[in-house]
Amino acid sequence: MNCNVPKPLIMSIDVTYKCTMRCLHCFNGSNENELEPELTDEELLYLADQIVDIMPNVICFCGGEPLIRREILYLCCEKIVKRTNGYTKVNVVTNGELVNNEVARNLRKAGFNLVQVSLDGAKPETHDWLRNKIGSFNKAVNAIKSLVEAGLYVGVAYTPTLKNIPEIDEAIKLCEQLGVCEFRVQPLMVMGRAKRNLNGYIPTYRDYQILATKLKQLQMQQIAKKGMNVEWGDPVDHLIRSNYRESGYNPFIGIDAYGYLRISPYLPLTFGNIRRHTILEYWNSGLSNVWSLPIVKWISKQIRATEDLDLSSKGFKEVYWEKSVDIDLIEDYISEVKPEQFFAKN
């Protein structure tokens, strides 16, 4: 296997699966199940050292609610920004509940590049319904205000449902008024709690086509007037593209809250754990072009559209709710991995 390829461009770290909410659509079951002990503060700091050595373009701290562990995130961000001379941009996502003026200033001081806040409606009742918590809309809006006032680049993530799609124009207008820099929408991931809670609220393929066309038109209008950036994302694009990469090059590394290495948050498959070896050791042992592996191609081809994201409906292990199949690229023999290992035991 040829490992002489560029570094990973994008990395993400799930710093915790603990959360201040129990959102109806959460795909990784945050605040509900813990499969193993999460990475400690010391392990996260050591991970920051490794990120400095790799120097990806972007690193994003995710969750759960990452700001539950904000003190260690400040230290990690400061280290990464300082030691890469600002080359590696550090982002964080949040539901906004723990953000106040002080937290916003600390995020700016630590060197965070972008803070993405979840806002899922233009009205309190709509957002609060999906977030499963009364008052969460007002807290998200106040968080955006604090972050903008602190001088941070603020993005908003909007998860479309049949309940909030009619409010999207109003939500975009609200975000512009608040000083948001980018507004990102991608299809609802029907995994985890979403498949349990949102029957009757999941948009159809046609709904998404209409919404995507509308957002792309808005994007062009916003570019023309140099306004807030509006984006439409596709969560399965990386899986489809992977099957056409001759090199198998892997531009993304995700690290879950237990230290396992992932190439996609939607596959029940990991490639080792940073508690055993460093990221670079795994990278040089095949993580760099792991998409070329037959077993990876086989499982990624199971997902062709957002409707296919719930692999557990085909008998596969449910990602984040059951332990994924771990192929340690340093310690295991890939040739010994069999397809039947990916299926849940009844």
Image: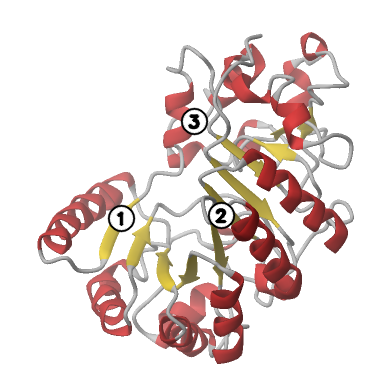
Q: Are marks 3 and 1 in contact (CB under 8 Å)?
A: no
> What residue is shown with label 3?
239
Locate the C terminus by quadrant.
top right
Q: Nearer the viewer, mark 3 or mark 1?
A: 1
> What residue is shown with label 1?
231
Observer-nearest of 273 and 6? 6
**How busy is the neighbourhood of tag 2: few (under 14 within 10 Å), some, or many (20 plus)?**
few
Upstream in sequence: badge 3 or badge 1: 1
Residue 205 visible from this viewpoint: yes
**How busy is the neighbourhood of tag 3: few (under 14 within 10 Å), some, or many (20 plus)?**
many
Upstream in sequence: badge 3 or badge 2: 2
Q: CA distance from mark 1 to mark 2?
A: 29 Å
- Residue 124, x across and y down, in percent: 42, 87
Amino acid type assigned to the residue bearing label 3 in the image? Leu
> What residue is shown with label 2?
85
Observer-nearest of 82 and 216? 82
- Residue 122, x across and y down, in percent: 34, 80
User: Left or right of 250: which side holds 171?
Assistant: left
Amino acid type assigned to the residue bearing label 1 in the image? Glu
Local secondary structure at mark 2: loop
